[in-house]
Amino acid sequence: MTDYVLYLPISEAQADLLATPSVSARETFERWDTHELAAVAVIQNLPALAGKPKSSMLIEKGIADLIAVGADLTDTHPPGTFADLIAQRFNREAFGRGRRLMSKLQIRFLDAETIDERNYLVGRYWDFKFCRRHSERLNPAKEVFHTVSGESFTLSSQQARTFRVLQSEPDESIHIQALAGTGKTHMIERLINTLTNCRPLVLAFTRVQLDALMLRVGVDRVSGMTFSELANYVLRRDPSKPYVDPGRRAMARHQVTPEDVASRLGFRAISRLNPGQVASACAKMVSRFCHSSESTIHEGHIPKLGFSLNTVEQAVLVQFANVLWNQTTEPTDPRFDLPLRGYHRIKLMSLVQDALIGHEYTHIIVDEAHDLSWPMASFLDRCPQPVISLGDACQRLDGNVSKRAGNIRQREVTHSIRAGRQVEDVINSLIEKNPLFQLGSLEGNSDKDTRVVYYDRADIPTSPTTILVSSEWGLFEWFQRLAKAGASFSLLPGAVTTFRRFILDCIELFNSQARPTHSALFRYASWDDLHADMDLSNMSFHRIDRMLRKGYSAKDFEASLLALDASGNAPIKLGRVVDAKNMEIDTVMLAPDLLGDVRPGDRIATGSAFAALYTAGTRARHQLIVPGYLKDWASDMSRKAKKSGK
């Protein structure tokens, strides 16, 4: 490979034209110049050159030789001779195969303006210095910085402006809103290298995110914690009360049924709610409270029940929810044994006014800060250390976007380093239509090609592709579909751990009404309860429902499981958006279940749907495959979200 991209003097639009079966190649070639015809021949022959020693040199020599042949034929033969030769040898299928190899071989098209400028020619012949020159011109990372040790690194102009602010005022808090692919992690690395005399604490939402970041940072003086680990650390330091380690109560698999919660805490029936349903409602109230900026549980946290409660009934439900909160976070009886999740601990930490991060840390750096809950953000804003947070509100998958305090400095980075300009139309439709905020539009990288392909029907891909779905239901549906088709596929690592448990729990719940253990199903005591809770627009669920009603069994699932490639190296990969959050993927296909429906006025659900599509779409480096109606869907959902003031 060369250390620069090889640019061929033909545009993507011209290549698209040749891919259309109804277009006559001979008539098209008659209108094209010699260099464009030479590029067609080179692309068609890429499969024969790929993998050969020094293939990049051979390919560039090929374009140079063909342009020279075309120029010489122009001098000695009638007009159109070179076009006839290329047309006689043109093979549309071979051209398509060669085109699919271009990104792998670091070969790109030129835009129409650059083709018209003809800076790739010296006279009538190929300029071997052009590609390096053009790569340097397009490369957005042009601004050079130096570390204390004398090493140098480059940043884009937007990154550089933000970085200079960090350098000039390292002891001031700041929040950087940086769109996907703009180099947040790269800036964190460089920032830590700059803070040579400091002891930073790096925070991230999940252990996977944190481990990946710490591996890239690779500096011994830097410590790292997840948000939940930080809550444990802070609560242990609180001198006002002894902190009881949660033990197994903090394990994700530790569950207590609503009926058992009601029995242990003495909940009684309220209106039409039996004690178990009261416990379920209280759990939702506590969760809402934990993800809010409020200091007490009140009537506003009561979920929709399908009927009204009078004032007394509401007060009793609030009282029970407070009992659940108190016995979860500071139990008076260990026999209650209630699950204690990370969001419980983070909320408790935010309510302890004297709780702070110790002075052993001089700076707090938050990666993927869009995952901060309101309590976590408010806690960090009161810490004495400068807090530097980098995140992207467009990636908040639950739609509950938190904000740093109003007095915190804000900066915005919108220039993508990862994706080409072709994705702007798709991604910006999701940014601009999001009802939860207003942000600057994504600017793609002119130095990258990220092809966008629209589909009318979601067929199984024929080339290496990662299919991203919305939820476990989409995962179940596509798993069964790929297995039935005999496709070679594997699951993304994040989807592997609980996938089998989810499927078997579904089958058990449908057949024997057995209480599931999977967290996505645990609250349902019967398949009818689950069915009633599912929106009509969730087509993946309803397809699974029909499959189970036709007799799909655990034996059928285990047979399909044999089709799964356990090595993870299969050409087709399948996962949820949440499984791919911090990944960069060559080719991404957005499954149709990502484009669901939302209730009128539900801005949070709409924002969540937009976030899933945006997060999935911005994982793509070379190709993004999307439903053809995506932009129309985004406009419709945006209008629908504004119909009432929810």
Image: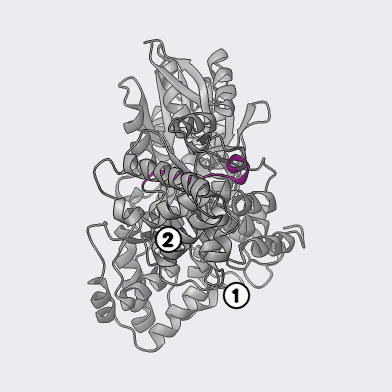
Q: Position of residue 73 (x, y in %)?
A: 48, 49
In the visual, does 182 lie left or right of 91? right
Q: Position of residue 602 (x, y in %)?
A: 67, 61
Confirm whether residue 389 shows in the render. yes
Q: Residue at label 1?
A: 272
In three-dimensional space, the C-alpha distance between marks 1 and 2, rounded to whole angstroms, equals: 67 Å
User: What amino acid is at disc 1?
Assistant: Arg
* Residue 95 disc label: 2
User: What amino acid is at disc 2?
Assistant: Phe
Residue 114 painted magenta: yes
Q: Position of residue 30 (x, y in %)?
A: 57, 59
Start and end of the magenta stretch? 105-115
Confirm whether residue 527 shows in the render. no
> How would you rate the neighbour count of disc 1 (Cα within 10 Å): few for under 14, some for 14-19, many for 20 or more?
few
Quadrant of the rendered image containing residue 106: top left
Residue projecting furthest to the front: 76
